[in-house]
Image: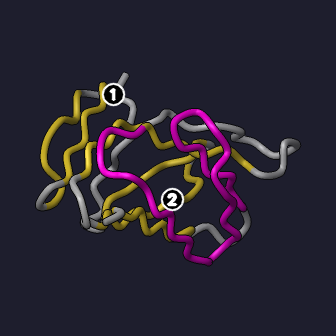
Amino acid sequence: MASKFNIINTSRHFGYTILLNGHESGAISPLKTSTLSIEPGQHELSFKDSDAENLPTHCKPIQITITDGKALNLKVLTEQFSIRIFDEHDTLLNGKRGFLCGKVGEGIRIENPIT
């Protein structure tokens, strides 16, 4: 059984290219939702601006370990000139200070050094 990333783009103006494990895995338009079916295990998730002329162009990736049949709900938006990834509880997962490591849901773990 596959696991899922459900991604909501809350930005009104920016579309994003979804980068999964370093490869383009889809796109998400402003104010739309996209779902990626993935194999259980560890994955690196990031986004870049679909329009290369706009800033920002890329965001810091997050490391996600997800078990079989689980779904992780994420929000992505551009704020203060950076692409930010939030979980469904509005926890910033790719911020600039401290260290985030821990469970964000049953069977889902985030390990991400925040620099």
Name the residue rendered at 34%, 49% in the picture.
92
Residue furthest out toward the bottom = 32
Closer to us: 97 or 86: 86
Name the residue rendered at 48%, 66% in the picture.
7
Is residue 75 covered in magenta? no
Identify the main secondary structure in magenta: strand
Q: Is residue 100 above or below residue 74?
A: above
Q: Is residue 12 left or right of residue 102?
A: right
Q: Mark 2 points at which residue?
A: 76
Name the residue rendered at 73%, 67% in the picture.
13
Measured in 3D between alpha carbons, the distance from the residue under mark 2 to the one under mark 1, in whole angstroms, is 17 Å
* Picture coordinates of residue 9, whole percent (x, y): 56, 68
Occupied quadrant, residue 29: bottom right
Occupied quadrant, residue 105: bottom left
**Disc 2 residue type (three-letter):** Val
Q: How crowded is mark 1: few (under 14 residues within 10 Å), some or many (20 or more)?
A: some
Q: In this view, does 85 lie to the left or right of 2?
A: right
**Disc 1 residue type (three-letter):** Ile
Name the residue rendered at 21%, 54% in the picture.
67
Q: Earlier in the sequence, mark 2 or mark 1?
A: 2
Occupied quadrant, residue 102: top left
Report the magenta residues as a range: 15-43
* Picture coordinates of residue 71, whole percent (x, y): 30, 67
* Picture coordinates of residue 6, whole percent (x, y): 43, 69
Pointers 2 and 1 in contact (CB under 8 A)?
no
Query: The C terminus appears in which quarter of the rendering?
Result: top left
* Residue 114, label in figure: 1
Q: How crowded is mark 2: few (under 14 residues within 10 Å), some or many (20 or more)?
A: many
Query: The N terminus appears in which quarter of the rendering?
Result: bottom left
Is residue 33 covered in magenta? yes
* Picture coordinates of residue 100, whole percent (x, y): 22, 35
Q: In this view, does 64 lie above or below 36?
A: above
